[in-house]
Image: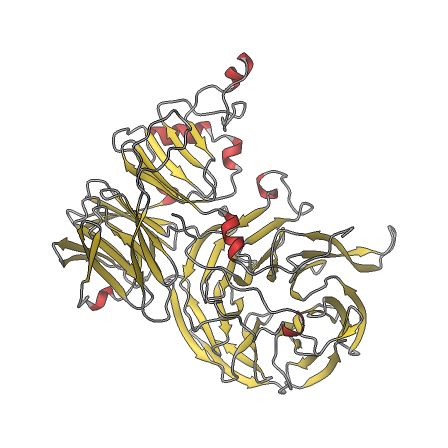
Amino acid sequence: RSTSGAKPESARARGARSERGERREGERGAAAIRCVAYNNQSNRLAVSRTDGTVEIYNLSANYFQEKFFPGHESRATEALCWAEGQRLFSAGLNGEIIEYDLQALNIKYAMDAFGGPIWSMAASPSDSQLLVGCEDGSVKLFQITPDKIQFERNFDRQKSRILSLSWHPSGTHIAAGSIDYISVFDVKSGSAVHKMIVDRQYMGVSKRKCIVWGVAFLSDGTVISVDSAGKVQFWDSATGTLVKSHLIANADVQSIAVANQEDSFVVGTAEGTVFHFQLVPVTSNSSEKQWVRTKPFQHHTHDVRTVAHSPTSLISGGTDTHLVIRPLMEKVEVKNYDAALRKITFPHRRLISCSRKRHLLLFQFAHHLELWRLGSTVATGKNGDTLPLSKNADHLLYLKTKGPENIICSCISPCGSWIAYSTASRFFLYRLNYEHDNINLKRVSKMPAFLRSALQILFSEDSTKLFVASNQGALHIVQLSGGSFKHLHAFQPQSGTVEAMCLLAVSPDGNWLAASGTSAGVHVYNVKQLKVFEYSIPDKHYTDWSRTVQKHGFHHLWLQRDTPITHISFHPKRPMHILLHDAYMFCIIDKSLPLPNDKTLLYNPFPPTNESDVQRRTAHAFKISKIYKPLLFMDLLDERTLVAVERPLDDIIAQLPPPIKKKKFGT
């Protein structure tokens, strides 16, 4: 049994029903992407999903999802932006503005804007002010202080909700998109200086209303708008007149993002198409330039709810759950790894844990856990055969959380007798007793206050200890005995720091615990002596094999992989074997064999066909399988058995509502 951990969001209501206020029943899944925000200073991308989950990707480190903030049922995020360099803000339909603590990985504070649901937000070019657009037609200006934000004033209230906002690069004016019109405000006075009426015509038919989903204010005073009538329009903000209009879709154009140099922009549509516009000379020798639609991309099956424009790529996300990063070939200096299209679907953290002793898998969803016993077979066969099950998998337990918060982390003990999980405010520990095919589940009550919440949970190999990384930066060691627990020790963070530990690993003998946080440091704890050893990744000492790898270098195809390794384990009886996987391959590294060079085939899916092929396929250390994909989980059950969990993308797409039908040529 496999799972993605969430059900995707329903598609946006379209045409005359395309206002964001209309939400279909069953839209509470955590999969659909709602907003993306690119940070040019740190080359990081913030992504929010429809359940309030926020993820941060490091684009300089193989697009790794290095941080995440769990979702909440009451936080339907509609806007996301960076300000003052590394400060991240979001706003949504609950009317609150939220700032995130990127070190402690929790919400720093939430502030009510007192304008009803918030539909849009934008930081000033100076990064010192924040604008939000509200349901009641108000545009509110906040001053960003070192510790918080402070309300400054309201702009002239409009007749309808403010669905999109954009600052002029000088910071003197803003453009605001509403229903049927665009307003231009003077920031100093807060007054509307122009109101530009948007044409309701849609494919020759006058619509009931036209929704301005996005606006972009350029340095020369041009305002670009995208709307529910399928149009991209250019306006002169000085005169309030329409300059040019492009009809590009038979449905809503829902998002827009402009490059810093203002020489290109990207838009996303409800048909799943992303269009690229570029500013090009009118003629080969002309200094006059015009906006031209240059490239359409179809990497999504459903609505493209949000787009971003980095210096070298176009970024898009939407209802189909995929985060797509498409490099601009003319901006990429080296035409290899950096030029690869990336489509990120699954989180770079584990949503599945395993009880090796009882052959159980625990699956983590947004609001519940499922426990399954693996099936088994008595059949035999040759290498590559698929064997019939003599006993099917059993669904043993469905454990639903209470309250609106998403589950952050979960784990089942190797012996199968304990289950622990945490939300943002509560930690839960259960004892499991097995009687034939029945399970008796008992919750451990009266948890201490310091175990209020956890970012990561891990059991020791012998299931006698529980390691808990709290959201306050501390690491707790809990002794498990029978149906009770005892707190043994807490490793506290260094004075003056609250670095959240989001990765944990324990040695097989239970003596050593490694933890890594939001910085590049790794902490190693001696569980027996309760001491800590710390080293940073750049200064660590390597084994002889690791030094050989550094000297020799990796195969170029290995370096060009576009997904990060999500799990590494070691064979208990074969110390020379390292097992690892990402979303699209499983690999066993045999340290006793030579490393492959660039002339050697890295992937050997088929037997050699002739003598020269045999020479090319010299035995090397990397044994790679791409049978299972996307691969969410893989680990050893025992010395001779692996368990793999894959989540076919077709299954996810099948759960989504039908996409907009597009007329094909000749039909």
The residue nearer to you, when weighing 505 against 305, is 305
Residue 417 x, y percent position in the rendering: 19, 51
Q: Residue at x 74, y 67 (%)?
A: 231
Image point 53% across, 26% down: which residue? 598
Q: Image quadrant of residue 105? A: bottom left
- Residue 230 appears in the figure: yes
Give coordinates of residue 10: x percent, y percent: 53, 64
Residue 248 percent location from the top left of the image: 74, 61
Residue 258 appears in the picture as rendered: no
How many numbered marks appear? 0
Image quadrant where residue 189 sits: bottom right
Q: Is residue 666 above or below residue 421?
A: above
Judging depth in this view, the residue of 367 and 658 nearest the camera is: 658
Q: Position of residue 404 (x, y in %)?
A: 37, 71
Query: Residue at the front extreme?
Result: 390
Nearer-the-camera pick, 364 or 521: 364
